Image: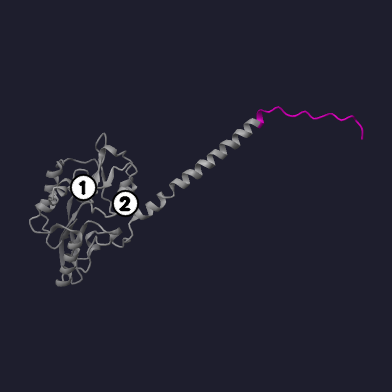
Amino acid sequence: MAVLVDLTKCIGCESCSVACKLWNKLPYGRKKSRPQKEKDLNDDNWTVIQEKHVEAENGKAYTRFVKKQCLHCLEPSCASACFSKALRVDPDTHAVVYVPELCVGCRYCMIACPFEIPRYQWDEPLPLVTKCEFCVSRLKDGDAPACVSACPTGALVYGDREALLARAHETIANDPRYVDYVYGEKELGGTQWLYLSDQPFEKLGFKMGLEEIPPSTYTHAYLSKVPFLAAAWGLFLAGLSLYHHRREKNAKRPPEKKEEGDGRI
């Protein structure tokens, strides 16, 4: 499943942000010790609407509202980097979910995420990592995510990913206003949040030029060598231990007495 976001239809009302907070019981209006230069995600805001101003080639200025949240990659780097399995892919919905009881606070997921989505609870005594979880319990009940259900303009559409991609490409083909590109279709193996826009994505803050191969592919390639490296390291340590043991044994052995000659030449 996936969500198609049509940025031409978003009016910046933030109904989606409010619905997210209500459904996930997130606090509102708390002051943070780390101020942000612009409105962005934090441990209390799992989705935000960012206002972007674009000057087009025709000289006209446009304002677009961009919804930001976890993109729920098909091959998530965060889950691949999480050795404690606190971040994992739900087998039923493919949502990237978080199990706080398993989190050790290493923040490898924050480093691994190419979209810089996971946030840390810097102001909490026992901090955790937070991010959008795609309202996974709603999906399992057959409902759309809370943000999608709250959108009054139809800017957010939930459904089968392939069907949404077909719909997106049909929209692009029939309306010359749209950029001929669906963001999220191929980025890093594809994401479950897809975007349509009438303005260049790079001018709206989207990361461009990303590979189509998911980073987790490289992670798996390295991790597959771990058993071999562990075995090799074990053999090396065993050999080193044996070498030192023999040196200590030889050092404790009394020196051999040299036989005295009879003086004959």
- Magenta segment, which residues? 250-265
Instruction: Locate residue 256: give its quadrant.
Output: top right
At 14% from the left and 72% from the top, the residue drawn is 174
Q: Amino acid type of disc 1?
A: Glu
**Name of the residue lying farthest toward the front:** 92
Nearer to us in this view, 83 or 228: 228
Which residue: 31% across, 51% down?
77
**Picture layout, residue 165 above or below residue 71:** below
Where residue 185 sits in the image (x, y, percent)? Answer: 24, 62
Identify residue type, mark 2: Ser
Which residue is more in the foreground, 52 or 256? 256
| Quadrant in which the C terminus appears | top right
Magenta residues, dominant SS class = loop
- Give the distance between the C-alpha atoms of the residues marked 1 and 2, in whole angstroms: 15 Å
Residue at 28%, 51% in the rendered image = 116
Q: Are marks 1 and 2 in contact (CB under 8 Å)?
A: no
Q: Which label was assigned to residue 77?
A: 2
Left or right position of 170 against 247: left
Please say whether residue 258 is one of the residues in the magenta stretch.
yes
Q: Residues within 10 Å of mark 1 (few under 14, many from 20)?
A: some
